[in-house]
Amino acid sequence: MTTIIVSPLARIAEMAVRHGAREMISLMAKEQTFHRPAVIRADRHLLLNMNDITFAGTGDLVAPQELHVRQIIDFAQSWDRSAPLVVHCWMGVSRSPAAALIAMLAVHPEEDDLALVGRLRLASPYATPNARLIQIGDAMLNRGGRLVEAVRSIGRGADADGNAPFILASETEKLFG
């Protein structure tokens, strides 16, 4: 099973319990604190501290880096896929959709970038994947610019209130939400 639950922070426990998740990737600013849902194993929780910016940060802002993307890829490749993976950020709109695309391509490199991003847009009219994460992921996964172009083709998502989790499934699995 290759199903990724993309969620805002406020709904991670609900989504993890509802979908039987045991693993999670959190993309949060360093100063933001939260509690890992009890159903998520501590050894299968990847916390990446970064801000939702698309430029090299100044001051206290931390831009997504190659190390962050490498950790997403490595974590996804070690995910056993017997249960969904929860990926979240503060709103579930920018960092986490980008990480979900990277994770899906890490475990299913045969996926067509445009089709995958199209499924993301169908699942979430709000998603606007973080461009910096996408650029780094495209390069690290040897996508040849296809992921960047696919994300660019869907444009900016609709305005969101941070309360719209969604499911991204592999091409061979039914998309539901």
Image (tube, rainbow, N blue to C red):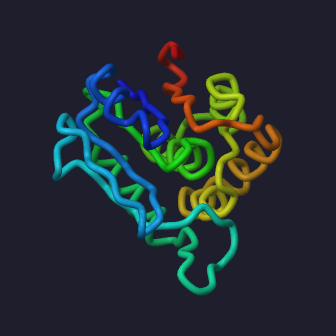
User: Residue lying farthest bottom?
Assistant: 59
* x then y, percent, for residue 146: 72, 49
The residue located at (58%, 72%) in the rendering is 63
The residue located at (72%, 35%) in the rendering is 114
The front one of 75 and 86 is 86
Query: For this view, does 74 lie left or right of residue 97?
Result: left
Quick check: 56 above or below 80?
Answer: below
Query: For this view, does 159 lie left or right of residue 5?
Result: right
Quick check: 110 above or below 55?
Answer: above
The front one of 75 and 88 is 88
* x then y, percent, for residue 111: 57, 35
Res 138 quadrant in image: bottom right
Res 91 quadrant in image: top right
Number of numbered discs: 0
Query: For this view, does 78 lie left or right of residue 117?
Result: left
The residue located at (70%, 44%) in the rendering is 128
* x then y, percent, for residue 118: 71, 29
